[in-house]
Image (spheres, coloured by chain):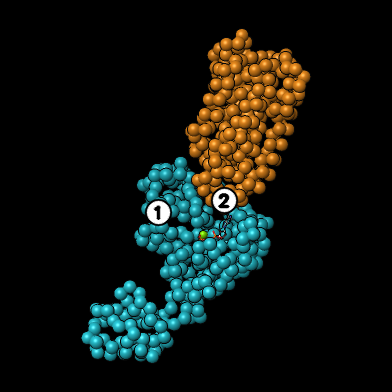
Chain colours: A cyan, B orange
């Protein structure tokens, strides 16, 4: 296993405020590494340091063996970057934006043209290639920004909330592309607020809170270790009596979720029998019944909720 | 270097037609010229040499200072900072774009002069002078934009406050040898003095320059180096504050 990103003791202060606090982690080649954390946790700050946009206050970053402080150009040459709040040049056409990126990464002209064409087709923007970016919708802009990040065929792709604010289709397209790039051997560093996205894409996730890493592991491992109780979610055709249900001894906690009830437990099997009995006795019909293991969201909430 | 050229190409596509560039670059020399030179009983080659110096000065200081604040505002800078290019490369790109603009627009007063019967006595010196001066002034323009602001207007105001006084001390409206001693001393501090002097030499003839040609050229080179080094240092400092 080869580390493509090694981070040691990385720290950044903004006028006394510690945005990133002595974090350590490695990203292995071919991995999709998820970076999760609440707003202001330090995700963007970390990505900006990893991509050489800002200098760390303290600590070391190595990108495929290149120290970003000492060899910034060589390290940057290997990455593609989709910043959180970035823009293509709105006055330039989609095509010129892509070619500009290729020029900055020293991609030969012919290769650049082929890549630009392939990427525009991939993102379904080929017929808009000569239009200025300012005429594009938010989703189209985001696609161009991602395409720009791929012009140098990077070894590592950094994406800071790439699907924020996109419609379902565009978000799915971007996830599909991330999956495809990963299948082709690229390493992906992804920050996101969508737990399902991280769960679906990432081999490993780091959860960061207040600038510190709260946990790093594979999603399933985290769920087992930290996620807590399993639960049974049930909905009836008529409102059910929560107090009657809480009399069932295996149920540790009940939470009402819209028209569903979430019953937290260690023994989902025996709860289901009790639910069947209960609905028969009360002349209720179960509309839906699910048993759920803890989700990444549960892990996230557990690790990031404020204590006290 | 190729990468700097790519940046220059981008700048040319985006900034040549921006309002402040056109206004400050093309219109201000025209107005100054009309306000201070037309109507005075002056020789045509004196007028054209002055206009040419001014045009070179204003056009090549008009593009380079606009780029940084605009790209701060439009969030392009963050993406650029992630690219494998150094700040020096980015700045050289901006300078190149500014140089091309300055050189291209300087043809207008030259052609105007030729149409009015001015002969170019030393074309090679003139070309050398213009190219050197446009580099020098473009680098100077970058110093104006090294405050980490996203407001183009702030930069424009700052640069205007420096540019206009420079025009008046640089022997454009009054030949340097007619200035009082303190005026001559002041003029020697302005890079514009030296390109104007070169224009006088090239258009009016061998006796019309105040400094020896080699001094003019040397002074422009020295100013260029000073401005360039200062611009790089200042922008290296201000870039992180822009993000
Ligand atoms: N340029 C800056 N100047 C001062 N403070 C900053 C700057 N950038 C970030 N911070 C602070 O650093 C902390 C971490 O911010 P960061 O942008 O890294 O969070 P994030 O995890 O990306 O949040 P989000 O999910 O909202 O994007 C915040 O408290 C923020 O206020
Ligand atoms: Mg962020």
- Percent of width and height locating residue A74: 62, 55
Locate ligand 1 by image quadrant. bottom right
Label 2 beta carbon less than 8 Å to ligand 1? yes
Q: Is residue A252 left or right of residue B212?
A: left
Query: Badge 1, how many Cα within 10 Å: few under 14, some, many 20+?
Result: some
* Quadrant where the N terminus of chain B is found in the figure: top right
| In this picture, residue B136 sits left or right of residue B14 | right
Element at label 1: helix
For the point 55% across and 21% down, the residue is: B31
Chain letter for mark 2 = B
Q: Is residue A100 visible?
A: no
Percent coordinates x, y for residue A175 in the rendering: 42, 63
Q: Which residue is mark 2?
A: B243
Instruction: Please tell me how crowded label 2 is: few (under 14), some (14-19), or many (20+) other residues with Cα within 10 Å.
Output: some
Callout 2: helix, strand or loop? loop
Q: Residue at x 37, y 53 (%)?
A: A124
Vertical order, A207 against B26 (above or below): below
Taking depth in this image into account, of B162 and B12 the one nearest to the observer is B162
| Near-viewer residue (A118 or A97) | A97
Q: Would you place residue B163 above or below residue B93 in this image?
A: above
| Residue drawn at 57 percent across, 11 percent down | B39
Q: Residue furthest top?
A: B41
Instruction: Using the rendered view, name the quadrant where residue B194 is placed.
Output: top right
Chain bearing mark 1: A
Locate residue B23, reporting x and y percent: 52, 29
| Residue under the point 59% across and 62% down | A19
Q: Which of the two marks, 1 or 2, is nearer to us in this view?
A: 2
Q: Which residue is mark 1?
A: A139
Asked whether the residues under marks 1 and 2 belong to the same chain, the reply is no
């Amino acid at each position: 296993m080869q580390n493509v990103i090694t981070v040691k003791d990385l720290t950044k202060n903004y006028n006394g405020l510690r945005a990133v606090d002595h974090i350590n982690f490695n990203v292995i080649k071919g991995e999709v590494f998820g970076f999760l954390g609440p707003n202001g946790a330090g995700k963007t700050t970390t990505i900006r340091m990893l991509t050489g946009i800002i200098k760390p206050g303290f600590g070391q970053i190595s990108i495929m063996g290149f120290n970003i402080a000492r060899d910034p150009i060589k390290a940057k040459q290997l990455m593609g970057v989709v910043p959180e709040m970035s823009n293509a040049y709105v006055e330039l056409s989609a095509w010129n934006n892509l070619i500009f990126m290729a020029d900055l990464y020293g991609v030969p002209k012919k290769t650049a043209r082929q890549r630009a064409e392939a990427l525009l087709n991939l993102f379904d923007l080929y017929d808009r290639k000569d239009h200025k970016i300012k005429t594009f919708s938010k989703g189209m802009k985001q696609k161009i920004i991602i395409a720009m990040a791929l012009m140098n065929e990077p070894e590592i792709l950094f994406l800071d909330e790439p699907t924020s604010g996109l419609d379902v289709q565009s978000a799915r397209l971007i996830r599909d592309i991330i999956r495809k790039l990963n299948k082709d051997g690229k390493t992906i560093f992804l920050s996101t607020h969508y737990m399902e996205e991280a769960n679906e894409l990432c081999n490993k996730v780091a959860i960061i809170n207040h600038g510190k890493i709260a946990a790093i592991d594979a999603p399933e491992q985290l769920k087992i270790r930290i996620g807590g109780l399993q639960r049974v979610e049930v909905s009836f055709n008529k409102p059910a009596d929560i107090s009657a249900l809480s009399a069932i001894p295996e149920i540790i906690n009940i939470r009402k979720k819209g028209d569903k009830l979430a019953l937290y437990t260690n023994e989902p099997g025996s709860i289901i029998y009790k639910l069947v009995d209960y609905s028969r006795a009360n002349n209720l019909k179960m509309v839906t019944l699910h048993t759920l293991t803890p989700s990444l969201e549960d892990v996230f909430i557990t690790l990031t909720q404020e204590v006290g | 270097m190729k990468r700097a050229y790519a940046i220059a190409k981008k700048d040319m596509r985006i900034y040549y037609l921006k309002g402040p560039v056109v206004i400050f670059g093309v219109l201000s020399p025209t107005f100054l010229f009309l306000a201070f030179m037309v109507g005075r009983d002056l020789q045509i080659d004196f007028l054209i040499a002055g206009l040419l110096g001014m045009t070179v000065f204003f056009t090549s200081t008009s593009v380079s200072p606009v780029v940084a604040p605009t790209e701060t505002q439009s969030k392009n800078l963050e993406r650029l900072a992630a690219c494998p290019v150094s700040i020096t490369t980015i700045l050289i790109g901006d300078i190149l774009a500014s140089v091309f603009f300055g050189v291209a627009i300087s043809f207008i007063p030259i052609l105007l002069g030729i149409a009015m019967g001015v002969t170019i006595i030393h074309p090679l010196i003139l070309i050398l002078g213009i190219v050197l001066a446009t580099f020098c002034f473009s680098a100077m323009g970058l110093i104006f934009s090294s405050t980490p602001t996203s407001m183009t207007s702030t930069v424009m105001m700052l640069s205007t406050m420096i540019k206009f006084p420079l025009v008046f001390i640089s022997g454009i409206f009054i030949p340097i040898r007619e200035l009082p001693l303190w005026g001559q001393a002041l003029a020697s501090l302005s890079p514009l003095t030296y390109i104007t002097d070169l224009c006088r030499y090239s258009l009016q003839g061998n006796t019309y320059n105040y400094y020896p040609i080699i001094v003019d050229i040397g002074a422009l080179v020295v100013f260029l180096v000073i401005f360039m080094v200062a611009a790089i240092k200042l922008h290296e400092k201000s870039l992180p504050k822009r993000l």
